[in-house]
Amino acid sequence: MSEGTTKHTVTVRIAGEEHVLRSSADPEYTRKCAAFLDERIREIRDFSGLVENHRAVILAALAITDQFFSAREELDRMRREVTSRTTNLSRRIEERMAPQELPLLPPDDDGS
C-alpha cells in the first residue's frame, strides 16, 4: 500500500464509522481498499445477520486473509510451474543447438 514518502490524509467510511487515514498510498487506492473492506463487512452482516460491527469486522478480516493466503499459494504454485517449464524449454533448446557429431567417413579406396 505504500508508494512513496508523501503522506496523504483520506477520510473513509467503514462499517458505518468514519475513519481518517494517513497513508503514503494514492488516496484513490486507499478509498478503494476501504470500500472493499466495507463491502465485505456488509456482505458478512447481511449473510449472517450479525449486528455487532466488531464481530463482522473480525469475520471480514479472516475472509480476506483466507483469500490472500489462497492467492499467495496459487502464485507460488504458478512460479514453480513457470520455473520448471522455463528450465525444460531451455534444456531442449540447448540440446537442439548443440553441435552434432558427424560420423567419421571411411577413407577413399585410392588411399587419400
Image: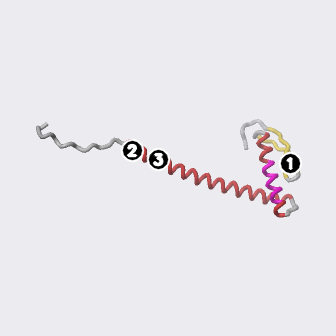
User: Which numbered marker is on residue 13?
Assistant: 1
Sooner in the amino-acid sequence: mark 1 or mark 2: 1
Residue in the image at 78% along x and 57% along y: 60
In-front residue for pair 99/106: 106
Q: Amino acid at mark 1?
A: Arg
User: Which quadrant would residue 106 be assigned to in this image?
Assistant: top left
Determine the CA span between mark 1 and mark 2: 61 Å
User: Which numbered marker is on residue 96?
Assistant: 2
Residue in the image at 76% along x and 39% along y: 26
Q: Main secondary structure of the magenta part?
A: helix
Q: Position of residue 20 (x, y in %)?
A: 85, 44
Image quarter hosting the N terminus: top right
Number of other residues with Cα within 10 Å of mark 2, as a class: few under 14, some 14 to 19, many 20 or more: few
Q: Which residue is mark 3?
A: 89
Determine the CA span between mark 3 and mark 2: 11 Å
| Horizontal arrangement in the rendering, residue 23 relative to residue 100 (left or right) | right
User: What secondary structure is found at the residue carrying circle 2?
Assistant: helix
Q: Amino acid at mark 3?
A: Leu
Residue farthest toward the front in the current orientation of the protein: 109
